[in-house]
Amino acid sequence: MRELIEKALQAREKAYAPYSKFKVGTALLTKDGKIYTGCNVENVSYPVGICAERTAISKAVADGERNFTAIAIVGSGEDHCMPCGMCRQFMAEFCKGNFDVIVAKSIDDYKIIKMSELLPHTFKMINEE
Ligand code: THU
């Protein structure tokens, strides 16, 4: 937990957010104990930018990982940084109900939210299990 938040804080330093100035860092834990970090990467054409959550998950999936147990997220605001709707949907693809979403402001100030709370009633294809 502590290590995951620390890694997310470090990753936030890499954020490229010249437009919003809102830096986000993430650290994603695989079932086997590996950690993949992410940060937001903005673009002069605003919608092209990517959030820190999707960056970490994409790095991990590109590295062959698909089983995750938790993600730590640190933003820059006064409140805990909650993942946006697009990231919730992106996470739901790989992170099932019991997955822990740790929204942290610091090592000691965090909340843990289950994926099932964050995105209940997820979309499923009719023929999917
Ligand atoms: N952002 C994230 O990286 N993750 C979130 O969960 C919310 C928003 C980024 C997108 C954009 O670069 C900046 O924060 C402001 O919206």
Image (cartoon, helix red, strand yellow):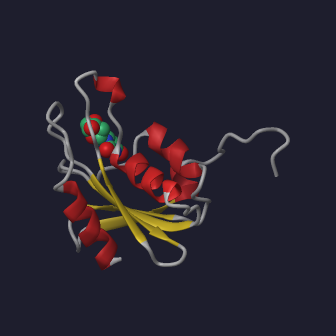
Residue at 59%, 55% (x, y): give it. 94
65 lies left or right of 78: right
Q: Quadrant of the N terminus?
A: bottom left
User: Is residue 84 shown above or below 32?
Assistant: above
Where residue 72 sits, quadrant-wise, is bottom left
Residue at point 50% right, 54% down? 62
Q: Is residue 113 visible?
A: yes
117 sits to left or right of 104: right
Task: Give residue 92's position: percent from left, percent from top.
Answer: 58, 50
- Outermost residue toward the right in this view: 127
Q: Position of residue 93 (x, y in %)?
A: 60, 49
Vertical position of residue 64 compared to residue 76: above or below: below
**Residue in front for this viewpoint, 33 or 106:** 33
* Residue occupying the far front of the picture: 63
Q: Residue furthest top?
A: 45
Q: Name the residue nearer the viewer: 85 or 79.
A: 85
Q: Quadrant of ligand 1?
A: top left
* Horizontal relation, residue 43 to residue 92: left or right: left
- x, y (%) of residue 105? 22, 61
Residue 48 drawn above or below residue 114: above
Q: How many marks?
A: 0
Residue at screen point 49% across, 60% down: 63
Residue 105 visible, this angle: no
The structure residue drawn at horizontal position 66% and vertical position 45%, both measured from the top left corner, is 121
Q: Is residue 64 left or right of residue 38?
A: right
Q: Position of residue 4 (x, y in %)?
A: 33, 72
